Each structure stands twice: as C-alpha cells, then as structure tokens.
Image (tube, grey):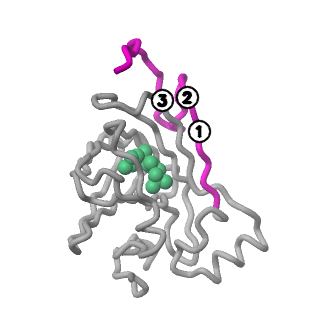
Amino acid sequence: MTLTAPSKTEVDFASGALSRADYSIQRRLSDMTAMYADRDEAARILAQEGDRLIYEVQGVELPVEEGQIPHCTTRILPGAIGGEFHMTKGHYHARREQGEVYFGLAGRGLLLLQTEDGATSEIEMVAGSAAYVPPYWAHRTVNIGAEDFVFFSVWEARAGHDYGTIERDGFRKLVLLREGRAAVVDNPRYA
Ligand code: S6P
Ligand code: ZN
C-alpha cells in the first residue's frame, strides 16, 4: 500500500483541461472506424477529410491499489459519422463489480449503458448531471449537442478496462441524428 500525498487539480469545465494531467489520450477516427455503424462513411471521411479527433481524456494517475480513486475528464467533440454521433469507444470494467460516477461539466451528452444479460439504459447529461454507472454495466458516452460535451469521471483504481468485448460485439444501441434530434435505435449489427 502506497501512502499517496493529497493533491488537487483545477478543472476547466469548458475544455476539460486539468492543471495536473498525468496523462492525456486522444482518440481519432482511425482508432475506431470499425465501431461506427456506417464503416464505409467512416473510411470515406478518413480518406478525404483526414483523421479527425473524436475525443480526448486527461487524467490523474494513481497506483492501482484498493482504495485509490483515479479521476479524469473526457471531452467529446461535436459531430457525426454517417449520422451517428461522435462517441467514446466504451467498455466494461475488467473487474465487473466496480462502478463509477460521471459528472457533466459542459455541453449535452447521452450515457449509454448495457449489461451482458441484455439490459440497456440511456441517461441524458448536461452540466451538473451526476450519473451513476453501477457495477456490471458497460458504458459509452455520446455527444448529442453542437458544442463539446465534457464530463468528469471517478472510479476505483482496480476497475480496469475491458475494451475487447465492445470491440468484438459492439453496443446494443446506436445514437443517430434523426430529424434534427438524437434518436436511440437498435444496432442491427449487434453480435
Ligand atoms: C473510465 C471512465 C472514463 C472513460 C473515458 C473514455 O473508467 O469510464 O474516464 O475512460 O470517458 O472512454 P473510453 O471508453 O475510451 O475509456
Ligand atoms: Zn469506466
């Protein structure tokens, strides 16, 4: 067990920038072309418009030990790929029994959740929304607004990330732009 020094990071709500960012991750279209329903359109954008930034994460890194509480921000840029809103990759926690809390800082988002048993849920998030991701629920966030969607996440260090299950099976629901609004529809390709 490490005796960790108390610390503080200043959060810029509009951008998600942290004064103490131990790491930052950029996810571009090329990192997730196969995750969008319209893969042809994703490939076309990549070839003709370049490798657009979809989202970025900045976080405070802590030892992976019981009781440590890592935290980070995520900023998802506005936009869509073939009518499907920009989104995160999404994951289950490697340790399924670990939950998480999301807090909206700016913009408008949708938190998609699903369990391996087939339950699904959607939570709309704006600045000030505190959303709870319970144990056993995979989670993906989607920017359904015209501005950056920014939120803060807090979880237990040992939760870990299982991206492979979502990469293989996808999410049960897609969030599409329909008649100017976000529509949650069944994913026809869900494995
Ligand atoms: C971590 C937490 C979030 C996401 C981040 C990016 O457990 O759920 O901080 O890591 O929003 O999403 P993803 O699916 O690429 O990790
Ligand atoms: Zn998570």
Mark 1 closeness class: few <14, some 14–19, many ≥20 residues within 10 Å:
some
43 with respect to 47 (left or right): left
What is the secondary structure assignment of the residue under circle 3? strand
Q: Do the residues labelled 2 and 3 touch (CB within 8 Å)?
A: yes
Name the image quarter holding the N terminus: top left
Which residues are drawn in magenta? 1-28
Whole-percent x, y for residue 101 in the image: 29, 42
How far apart are the alpha carbons under marks 1 and 2? 7 Å
How far apart are the alpha carbons under marks 1 and 3? 9 Å
- The residue tagged 2 is 21
98 in relation to 175, above or below: above
* Three-letter code, disc 3: Val
* Three-letter code, disc 1: Ser
Could you tell which of marks 1 and 3 lies nearer the N-terminus? 1
Instruction: Choose top left, top right, bottom left or bottom right for residue 188.
Output: bottom left
How many numbered circles are shown? 3
- The residue tagged 1 is 24
Mark 2 closeness class: few <14, some 14–19, many ≥20 residues within 10 Å:
some
- Rendered residue at 41%/57% (across/down): 162
Q: Which mark is residue 60?
A: 3
Q: Does the magenta stretch include residue 144?
A: no
Whole-percent x, y for residue 116 in the image: 26, 69
Magenta region, mostly helix, strand or loop? loop
- Rendered residue at 43%/85% (across/down): 189
